[in-house]
Amino acid sequence: MKEKILLISKDTLRTAALGCYGGQIWKTSNIDELAEKGTVFRRHYTAAATSAMSYSSMFTGKYCHEMDRKKFTEVEHYKGDSLFRILEDRGYACHIFWGESWSRNVIPYTKIYGDKTCFHNLDIEQRVGAEPIKKVSKKDKTVKDTVNRIVEEVLKVKEEKAFLWIHFPHVLFGASCYDSDIDMFDFFVGEMRKYYNDDSIYITSDHGHMNMSKGVPVYGFHLYEEGVHVPLITPRIDGMNTIDFPTSHTQLMEIILDNKISKQECIFIDTQYYLQENRKLAVIKNNFKYIYNKRTKSEELYDLEFDIQENVNLLQKQVEEKGRGKIYWLDEIYFYNKWSIIPSIYKELRAKKDEIWKEGSFFEELLYKINFKRKYFINKIKNKKILSKLKGISNSNPHISKYQR
């Protein structure tokens, strides 16, 4: 194994932001060069649509439903193997670099780290969206200073054998919004390449970001491609420049420890643990994605080769055009050349869902729903007050006004 292993990730990093995945907006020359030399996973997926759940799967190799956790709350220490524990047993020093809030918002909900894992909690986050805003001036200089602080902290690691996980926040301090700091993320990768060999660097994300696709602002409660399809770029595996079949973050341990990848029969993606009301589960096999919604009991099926935007749910038999006041049979107005196999695909993927699906008892489910509704309305009121105060949002005008950063 390599003596130095660097896993560099960025929260909500989308494939569309990187040149090696066809991104047009940012120049990501360092990441693109690593992609050219290494292996690009074209259809890599997070195991969960939120950070803490995703980390638990990334570093244990277990899907969320295999962790036997009921809901998102502080957990007991995970008793199985994790990447940190395995590497520490092999003599590696393990270091984690992330934003200060991650120690509060992630560690209690994961607890999959090694006994000797060293946490570097850095002041590197820019609050955006519904959070209180940090005011900054000279943005370009501020962002670069933020990146340089991360570089300085990483270079303090002197152990000969070390695993370093460097996780960038949603937005670096000094930047303005999601995806606005991609150039600085690439700059950081370039700085690391000055000190570490290219064949020791891995690039990925914990989960994606809906970016207003389908009208959804961020992430966490949806399993569409923008939210769950994530980049993964590794040193060359078995001479392959690209991996085109679906892969999962649960395979990250296999990739890092053994430098190999195997094709799975299917992969799973969760939004929440099994007791939670807003749980959605996706099952992906080849080009098909099946989604089950616990709260509404609804189902969706998409052919990702034919319909990458996931516009047409192939399980929807009829569609209504309200302007005409008419209802049409989907298979008569939507051209699709695989209608004949959809019943068998649906039956197979639903069966895979049924194999791993479970729910709590009646009273467990009821109690969770009551507590969830209470917390939801409290948070909604708090967020509305914050937005109203900081961004000039009023009840009569839903648009941002009189807002200065």
Image: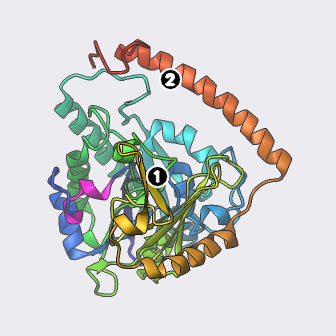
Given residues 241 and 221, the one toward you in this image is 221
Residue drawn at x 64%, y 75% as measured from the top left: 351
Within-10-Å neighbours for mark 2: few <14, some 14–19, many 20+: some
State if disc 2 and disc 1 touch (CB < 8 Å).
no
Task: Assign the C terminus to one quadrant of the image.
Answer: top left
Which residue is identified by label 2? 383
Q: Residue 343 placed where, x, y %? A: 54, 77
Residue 73 shows in the view: yes
Which residue is identified by label 1? 96
Given residues 185 and 281, the one toward you in this image is 281
Q: Is residue 397 above or below residue 69?
A: above
Q: Determine the secondary structure under disc 2.
A: helix
Of mark 1 and mark 2, the one earlier in the sequence is 1
Number of numbered discs: 2
- Kind of residue indicated by mark 1: Ile
- Kind of residue indicated by mark 2: Asn
Residue drawn at x 49%, y 59% as measured from the top left: 94
Q: Is residue 274 above or below residue 120?
A: below
Magenta: main secondary structure equals helix
From the viewer's perspective, is 208 left or right of 92? left
Given residues 65 and 120, the one toward you in this image is 65
Within-10-Å neighbours for mark 1: few <14, some 14–19, many 20+: some
**In front of the other: label 1 or label 2?**
2
Q: Residue 369 placed where, x, y %? A: 73, 39
Task: Assign the N terminus to one quadrant of the image.
Answer: bottom left
| Magenta-highlighted residues | 14-21
